[in-house]
Image (cartoon, rainbow, N blue to C red):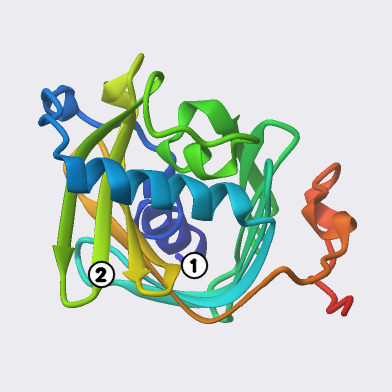
């Protein structure tokens, strides 16, 4: 029963980051205003200047299911989400792949980073044009929201990045899956520019993964 419960719960946790979006995501992007273009340049500069990040996160699924844990990002290419007990889940991006691992079932699922909207964040150089389409820019209560999808494959999904506007800081993202379900990830206790251990992003054998170690 425990095994069936966990398998059925997986789409409610990290997997909406990886699932393809429906064809309804293929709308035309609105024309950018001069203010939008200025803000998008600021977002590009912020993201390209972001090397390492550590934060606590709270993840909320479409049905209200929640999970929390610790997030690590090391741009370009690396990300790790450790979920707090009782969730036995781990999400790692490295070497061009996303791995979703259930520690209890000892089962990994792997997809290419380039096939997910979240992979946009992990690129070596982020440009919000060309092969990335900006679907919308919104501002409210000191927050800037930017919705993106990969131009060549809009059906794989959209991600909305939410920034504190002044000073600019990544606070949240939302990803939409193939059934139009939204997964929201909110960051807190954010640290940037910190030293991280490269080994915590390795996943050669998930059965022998260790928890991240503070390497400051």
> Where 92 falls versus 194 (above or below)?
above
Work out whether residue 87 or residue 187 is closer to the camera in this orientation and state it.
Answer: 187
With 147 as the anchor, is 82 left or right in this view? right
Numbered marks: total: 2
Q: CA distance from mark 2 to mark 1?
A: 40 Å
Q: Secondary structure at mark 2?
A: strand
Work out whether residue 51 or residue 206 is closer to the camera in this orientation and state it.
Answer: 51
Question: In the picture, which quadrant includes the N terminus?
Answer: bottom left
Image position, residue 129 (x, y; %): 37, 26
- Badge 1 density bin: few <14, some 14–19, many ≥20, Cα 10 Å: few
Q: Secondary structure at mark 1?
A: helix
Question: In the picture, which quadrant includes the C terminus?
Answer: bottom right
The quarter of the picture where residue 164 lies is bottom left
Q: Provide the residue designation for mark 2.
A: 143
Residue occupying the point 65% across, 34% down: 97
Asked if residue 81 can be seen in this view, the reply is yes
With 206 as the anchor, is 104 left or right in this view? left
Image position, residue 175 (x, y; %): 31, 49
> Where 33 falls versus 14 (above or below)?
above
Q: Provide the residue designation for mark 1.
A: 2
The quarter of the picture where residue 189 lies is bottom right
Q: Residue furthest top?
A: 152
Residue occupying the point 41% across, 51% down: 43
Image position, residue 37 (x, y; %): 27, 40
Q: Which numbered circle lies on residue 61?
A: none
Residue occupying the point 62% across, 57% down: 50
Work out whether residue 136 or residue 69 is closer to the camera in this orientation and state it.
Answer: 136
């Amino acid at each position: 029963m425990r095994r069936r419960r966990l398998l059925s719960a997986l789409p409610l946790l990290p997997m909406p980051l990886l699932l393809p979006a429906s064809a309804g995501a293929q709308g035309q992007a609105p024309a950018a205003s001069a203010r939008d273009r200025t803000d998008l340049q600021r977002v590009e500069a912020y993201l390209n200047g972001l090397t390492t990040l550590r934060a606590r996160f709270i993840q909320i699924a479409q049905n209200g299911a929640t999970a929390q844990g610790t997030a690590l990002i090391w741009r370009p290419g690396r990300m790790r989400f450790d979920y707090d007990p009782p969730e036995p889940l781990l999400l790692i991006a490295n070497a061009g792949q996303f791995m979703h691992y259930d520690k209890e079932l000892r089962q990994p699922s792997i997809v290419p980073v380039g096939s997910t909207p979240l992979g946009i964040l992990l690129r070596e150089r982020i440009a919000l044009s060309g092969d990335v389409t900006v679907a919308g820019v919104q501002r409210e209560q000191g927050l800037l929201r930017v919705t993106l999808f990969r131009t060549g494959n809009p059906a794989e999904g959209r991600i909305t990045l939410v920034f504190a506007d002044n000073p600019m800081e990544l606070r949240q993202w939302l990803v939409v899956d193939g059934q139009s379900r939204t997964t929201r990830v909110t960051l807190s206790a954010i640290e940037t520019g910190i030293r991280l251990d490269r080994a915590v992003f390795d996943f050669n054998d998930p059965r022998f993964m260790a928890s991240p170690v503070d390497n400051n």
